């Protein structure tokens, strides 16, 4: 008998994310359950149009209650429960059913852990951390969510296994920069109000981790380090990410440009507390390279990569719940690429730049470093290598913009074939077609000049920027002077009427 799979989600104003979620679930599930908790946008209409089974749940500030209501509507043998901003990777979608069938044969398995890739959609979908989360489970009266917020899946039966489904990865965009910042700006005043109301150390201590994370999102390094230190001194450790407070603190110190000795002392303390974490050697390498200690930087990266082998192996076997060092991995490989470039070892430099790009292909310095290391190689070889990472149509503009002046005209021509904007001018220049390049670039500069004039002519006062001054004609300059005098006269009249008590 075929296995029936139900996909569940609770939503409120998710018109941006829901279409992608629905498209994914149509590929892997037989039944789609959407529970709306009070949307005022197009969410409900989208669910109906997609043919989902739509239900309504009055919001009572309890995520577990809403999710459990969704579970009760499902009729499948297995249930998928992802958020609306969380979908399975394309690879996972292709093997999904056969993987469920495989786990279904083992009656001792009740729940599947899936690796979630946390990506920043505002930064070219860079993966900044990964975690293992229960996302798929058998439909059972014993399996329900618990907790009004930060809800957890629990199995009251207790005699069934939760296992790692290695091939069923998901991609989550809910912690992208703009989304998190918006939520933080909304929540920080509430947190500060709660801190002001707190009367006991216990009440204050509870708020410190949330304040640290809030200020980390906003980039307030003094406050980040203040609350990180408070959390460390209290002895807090986050479940699944015990080194979190040290990670945030040391990264903040690096970004704030703290003196090397101070940062290294904090890293020594962090590595003593968490010697198995690759995160801290990677930060150390970045700091040492910045101070031109290339030997120390190389040693730190290599140590971090050795530790990552253990992390990778653990994650493959479902051991451990998070991997924060993955967000620094592309930078770690880039550090090695830079170091081997300085050593004159172009082969190792190219190898490490390539590894960096495999982690994040839009890392411009790694791409430029790779092509510098490959200087002299045949155009066909370079194009074949780049094609293993990039799509000619989709990424052509990025390639041309990043590599002009570094690779040959042949490579730029290949990736710039369909470019119609001013970047196409650089392609023509690389090919020696200066006449066509002039037309392309001239059009762009004409647009910029027109935009600059429009901005200058709509200013309330004469532009102070030197470039805009060049664009403004004598006629407009006189007009600015006249308008300025008129506004000054009106302002003096207004002040006189106020002093004289004359009403408008």
Image (tube, rainbow, N blue to C red):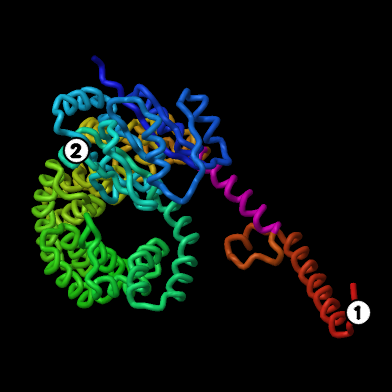
**Badge 1 is on which residue?**
502
What is the quadrant of the N terminus in the image? top left
Residue 397: x, y in percent? 40, 38
Q: Is residue 453 magenta?
A: yes
Where is residue 272, by image quadrant? Answer: bottom left
Q: Residues within 10 Å of mark 2 (few under 14, many from 20)?
A: few
Closer-to-camera residue (257/103): 103
The magenta-colored residue range is 440-458
Q: Is residue 383 something one can see in this rendering?
A: no
Closer-to-camera residue (297/479): 297
What is the quadrant of the C terminus in the image? bottom right
Where is residue 480, by image quadrant? Answer: bottom right
* Marks 1 & 2, CB-CB < 8 Å contact: no
Residue 70: x, y in percent? 40, 35
Residue located farthest toward the bottom when viewing the structure as drawn: 499
Which mark, residue 377? 2
Q: CA distance from mark 1 to mark 2?
A: 81 Å
Q: Is residue 442 magenta?
A: yes
Image point (37%, 44%), residue name: 173
Which mark, residue 240? none
Q: Residues within 10 Å of mark 1 (few under 14, many from 20)?
A: few
Image point (54%, 41%), residue name: 39
Q: Earlier in the sequence, mark 1 or mark 2?
A: 2
Image point (10%, 49%), residue name: 309
Q: Is residue 475 left or right of residue 453?
A: right
Against 214, is 115 above or below? Answer: above
Give the secondary structure at mark 1. Answer: loop
Dominant secondary-structure state across the stretch colored magenta: helix
Give the secondary structure at mark 2. Answer: loop
Foreground disc of the pair 1, 2: 1
């Amino acid at each position: 008998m075929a296995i029936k799979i139900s996909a569940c989600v609770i939503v409120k104003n998710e018109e941006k994310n829901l279409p992608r979620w629905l498209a994914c679930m149509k590929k892997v599930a037989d039944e789609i359950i959407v529970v709306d908790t009070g949307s005022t946008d197009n969410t409900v209409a989208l669910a109906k149009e997609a043919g989902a089974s739509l239900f309504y749940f009055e919001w009572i500030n309890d995520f577990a209650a809403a999710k459990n209501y969704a579970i009760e509507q499902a009729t499948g043998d297995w249930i998928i429960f992802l958020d609306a901003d969380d979908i399975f990777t394309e690879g996972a979608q292709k093997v999904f059913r056969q993987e469920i069938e495989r786990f279904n044969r083992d009656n001792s398995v009740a729940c599947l852990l899936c690796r979630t890739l946390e990506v920043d959609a505002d930064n070219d979908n860079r993966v900044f951390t990964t975690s293992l989360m229960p996302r798929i489970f058998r439909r059972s009266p014993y399996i329900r969510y618990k907790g009004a917020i930060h809800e957890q899946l629990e199995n009251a039966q207790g005699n069934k296994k939760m296992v790692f489904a290695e091939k069923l990865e998901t991609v989550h965009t809910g912690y992208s920069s703009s989304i998190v910042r918006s939520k933080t700006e909304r929540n920080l005043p509430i947190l500060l109000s709660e801190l002001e109301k707190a009367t006991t150390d216990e009440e204050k201590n509870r708020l410190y981790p949330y304040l640290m994370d809030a200020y980390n999102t906003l980039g307030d390094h003094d406050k980040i380090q203040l609350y990180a230190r408070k959390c460390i001194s209290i002895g807090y450790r986050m479940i699944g990410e015990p080194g979190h407070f040290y990670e945030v603190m040391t990264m903040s110190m690096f970004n704030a440009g703290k003196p090397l000795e101070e940062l290294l002392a904090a890293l020594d303390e962090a590595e003593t507390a968490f010697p198995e974490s690759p995160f801290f050697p990677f930060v150390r390498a970045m700091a040492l390279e910045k101070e031109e200690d290339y030997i120390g930087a190389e040693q730190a990266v290599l140590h971090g990569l050795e530790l990552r082998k253990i992390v990778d192996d653990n994650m493959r076997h479902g051991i451990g719940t998070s991997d924060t060092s993955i967000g620094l991995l592309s930078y770690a490989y880039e550090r090695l690429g830079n170091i081997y470039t300085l050593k004159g070892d172009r082969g190792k430099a190219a190898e490490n730049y390539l590894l960096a790009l495999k982690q994040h292909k839009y890392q411009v310095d790694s791409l430029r470093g790779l092509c510098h290391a490959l200087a002299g190689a045949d155009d066909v070889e370079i194009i074949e290598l780049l094609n293993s990472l990039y799509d000619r149509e989709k990424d052509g503009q990025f390639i041309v913009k990043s590599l002009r002046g570094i690779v040959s005209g042949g490579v730029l021509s290949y990736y710039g074939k369909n470019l119609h904007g001013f970047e196409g001018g650089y392609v023509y220049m690389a090919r020696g077609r200066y006449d066509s390049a002039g037309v392309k670039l001239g059009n762009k500069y004409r647009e910029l000049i027109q935009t600059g004039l429009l901005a200058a002519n709509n200013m309330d006062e004469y532009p102070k920027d030197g470039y805009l001054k060049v664009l403004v004609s004598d006629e407009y300059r006189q007009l600015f002077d006249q308008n300025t005098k008129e506004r000054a006269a009106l302002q003096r009249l207004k002040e006189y009427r106020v002093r004289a008590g004359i009403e408008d």
